[in-house]
Amino acid sequence: MKTNSIIEAKKGFFEIALKVNGERRELSVRNGEFLLDALRRHGWKGVKKGCDTGDCGSCTVILNGKPVLGCLVPAVAAHGGELTTIEGLGSVRSPHPLQEAFVEAGAVQCGFCIPGMILSSKHLLDNNPSPTEAEIRKALDGNLCRCTGYVQQVEAVKNAAKKMKRTSN
Amino acid sequence: MKSIKYYAFPSSVKEAMSLLLDRKYKAMALAGGTLVAKTLPDSVETYLDLKNVPIKGIKLAGGNLVIGAGATFDEIDRSKLCRSWAGGVISSAAAKCSSQLVRNMATIGGNIARPHSFNIFPVLLLGLDAKVRFACKTGTKLVDFQDLYSSGAGLRPGLDCLITEVIIPAKTRKWGCEFIKLAKTESSWESYIKLFFAVEKKGKFFAQARIAVGALSPRPFRAPAAEKALAAGETPEACAAALAAELAAARAGDYRCAAAANLLKRFVKSV
């Protein structure tokens, strides 16, 4: 998406255009707002607000093909970009293989960290369909979970990788 | 985040510099944003987003390793060229920065633009005799990293100039190196101490030796007495004692002095 070189805030808001979960959207974002807050304010509540300091990973979104921390990205920086939130992955009726695998492996307890964890895992599997356990743990090292010991989540990503490979073959 | 009036997406260094130097905008450069986004100075009214500026490549030039200032920690971690340089220490140091999510965003340029105790690359670049190329009002400027961090070289990166490249000299390509971050957890940004050891082996001797220490102050420093002991072929114990004495003089605390001395002994034995 082509962007103008400079955009100016009017009455405290920037008008930005971007693709969210494949749909073109125009959003008003405050001139001091981070992507996390802007997305939640516009209804994408799957982006979770945890530490707000870039430490916990619960605000993970995929921006222009890379998982990033929504609490550290100025909302206006997403202008012209492509964004994926957890809402763009699957639904209750038609879950993504990663979402299914997390449920099947019992990887979800309180669930607060899971959207971020699934988005980090999706990026990993999109780029590396057969990751080792070390690669899975490295990809998830920024997504903190205070309920579990990460064992089931790592298992879930392994299972999802197998399932996705079977589907693609 | 502080409220801002403008957000700019320059697509070239020239365009970025003209916006940066235009007083109307009171601009500050934003690379990965992991440090700057939450700590924007009050005087700044414009963010200058560098993501479209072509300063990201990692290449060989004149035998030197040239890392574009916009290269992220993740790109440096994955770069075959970085992995092949100085025993892979540049990539392994990049992989030790915080979490994957931060490594996807943070850049080498942003990591050295402002001194901070817990930054990774300053320690490494000090030990590797790196140079930094800037775009500034008068054109481009090449500065020794050591000078940038000791005197500032009259530059304010991100405010009146842009870091465009980091240059690792060819002589370091075959150096034996180790980078160590002692921290509470592997993904902690904060650390107790960061150490960089490097030697150039010539037969049974070390032709050159470098020891850089970080996390004790915003600017890393070298340990010249321990470097001299290493280059003179003294025993690992003598080198370690020299480093411990230098760290004690820098008020590093007993734990850090003992840990650094032991790690240096281990390094010397391993090379």
Image: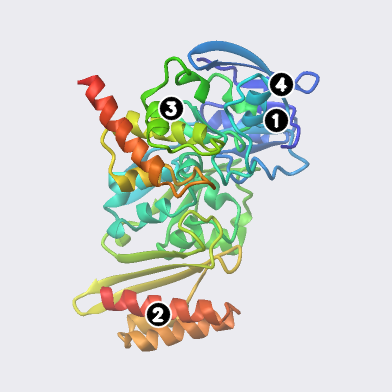
Q: Is residue B123 left or right of residue B253?
A: left
Q: Check if mark 2's residue and mark 1's residue have beta carbons within 8 Å.
A: no
- The image's colouring method is rainbow
Q: For the N terminus of chain B, give its image quadrant.
A: top right
Q: Nearer the viewer, mark 4 or mark 1?
A: 1
Q: Are dots 3 and 2 in contact, CB under 8 Å?
A: no
In the rendered structure, which amino acid carries the disc numbered 4? Answer: Glu
**Residue identified by numbered label 3:** A65
Residue drawn at the location 66% of the way across and 32% of the way down: A34
Q: How many marks?
A: 4
Circle 3/circle 1 CB separation < 8 Å: no
Residue count near mark 3 (Cα–Cα under 10 Å), binned few <14, some 14–19, many ≥20: few
Disc with the residue nearer the chain's start (4 vs 1): 4
Secondary element at tag 3: loop
Q: Comparing marks 2 and 4, which lies closer to the viewer? A: 2
* Towards the viewer: A166 or B119: A166
Q: Is residue B139 above or below residue B90?
A: above
- Chain identity of mark 2: B
Circle 1 Cα neighbour tier, 10 Å, few/some/many (<14 / 14–19 / ≥20): many
Question: What x and y, as percent, mark residue A40?
Answer: 65, 25
Dot 4 or dot 3: first in sequence order is: 4
Are labels 2 and 4 on one chain? no
* Residue placed under numbered mark 1 in the picture: A33
Q: What amino acid does circle 3 point to?
A: Gly
